[in-house]
Image (cartoon, grey):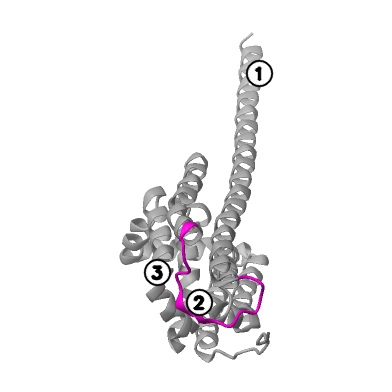
């Protein structure tokens, strides 16, 4: 039993991430120059941390094991690319600059409006993620030299589609809190087909893992079975945590709004009292 612990450079992915970093750095510097009062210390840290995690995970032995030996590890890697890293990148974007770009470019408005909302985002994300796990397509993403390097960026794109209605830096594209909670439920329901295929299939589906040398006690079938459960349970955990955070944010915003309204009412009541005394 031998596990490859080598690290791979992946120059195409590295070049793509460096290009994204340069584009982000240019626009971030431009935004700080034009609006120095709106500097956000954490935004560039979160964005660069996200890109660093993408590359570190993609070149690590975890990626090699996931592409050649264990589908469970491959699914675990996908979960990080889709669920966790996009949250860092979206929170690292400048809300003002992204909103300005959105308002100035008609094509961006059309694309984002088409892929936003409860039903479009849930259907598009789940459909794309399901298609990515069609055996023929998965084999291509595992072994084609260029596509395998760019797959992490593709998964990040899936993550942006999924998290957009909740974490979009463009306020108009974020759903109200009540709709965000319903949206999370639709995401969970939309994942049932892929979960069912992976978990309840009576045989292994992916040639790479069927033919791979076993490096664990898992057979190819049980490897696929537990990968399906990993997909479902990690989704439930992430979405449940997001659900709780949305409720807390909604409650906090409502309390703040009620406090402001009470302050206005109190000030108006005081003005009426003072006016009454003057008239008397």
Relative placement, left or right, of 273 versus 164 is right
Above or below — where is 204 with respect to 141?
Answer: above
Asked if residue 274 is positioned above or below residue 248 in the image, the reply reads: above
In three-dimensional space, the C-alpha distance between marks 1 and 3, rounded to whole angstroms, equals 74 Å
Residue 10: say if magenta.
Answer: no
Label 3: which residue? 134
**Front residue of this view, candidates 240 and 116:** 240
> On residue 274, which mark appears?
1
- Secondary element at image label 1: helix
Figure check: 259 above or below 188: above
Judge depth for marks 3 and 2 and give the one in front.
2
Q: Which residue is mark 2?
A: 210
Label 3 secondary element: loop
Please tell me which of labels 2 and 1 falls first in the chain.
Answer: 2
The 10 Å Cα crowd at callout 3, few under 14, some 14 to 19, many 20 or more, is: few
What segment carries the magenta color?
Answer: 200-218
Measured in 3D between alpha carbons, the distance from the residue under mark 3 to the one under mark 2, in whole angstroms, is 15 Å
């Amino acid at each position: 039993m031998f596990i490859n612990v080598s690290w791979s450079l992946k120059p195409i992915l590295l070049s793509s991430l460096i290009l994204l970093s340069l584009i982000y750095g240019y626009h971030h510097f431009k935004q700080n120059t034009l609006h120095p009062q709106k500097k956000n210390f954490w935004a560039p840290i979160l964005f660069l941390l996200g890109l660093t995690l993408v590359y570190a995970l993609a070149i690590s032995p975890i990626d090699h094991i996931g592409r050649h030996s264990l589908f469970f590890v491959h699914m675990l890697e996908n979960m990080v690319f889709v669920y966790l890293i996009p949250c860092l990148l979206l929170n690292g974007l400048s809300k003002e600059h992204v909103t300005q770009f959105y308002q100035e470019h008609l094509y961006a408005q059309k694309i984002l409006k088409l892929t936003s909302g409860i039903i479009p985002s849930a259907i598009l994300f789940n459909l794309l993620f399901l298609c990515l796990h069609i055996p023929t397509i998965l084999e291509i993403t595992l072994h084609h030299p260029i596509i395998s390097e760019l797959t992490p960026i593709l998964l990040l794109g899936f993550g942006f589609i999924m998290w957009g209605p909740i974490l979009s830096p463009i306020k108009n594209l974020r759903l109200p809190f009540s709709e965000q909670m319903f949206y999370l439920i639709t995401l969970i329901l939309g994942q049932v087909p892929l979960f069912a295929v992976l978990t309840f299939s009576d045989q292994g589906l992916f040639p790479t893992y069927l033919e791979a040398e076993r490096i664990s006690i898992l057979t190819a079938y049980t490897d696929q079975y537990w990968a399906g459960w990993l997909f479902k349970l990690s989704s439930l955990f992430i979405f449940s945590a997001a659900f709780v955070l949305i409720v807390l944010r909604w409650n906090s915003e409502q309390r703040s709004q009620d406090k402001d309204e009470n302050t206005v009412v109190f000030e108006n009541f005081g003005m009426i009292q003072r006016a009454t005394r003057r008239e008397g």
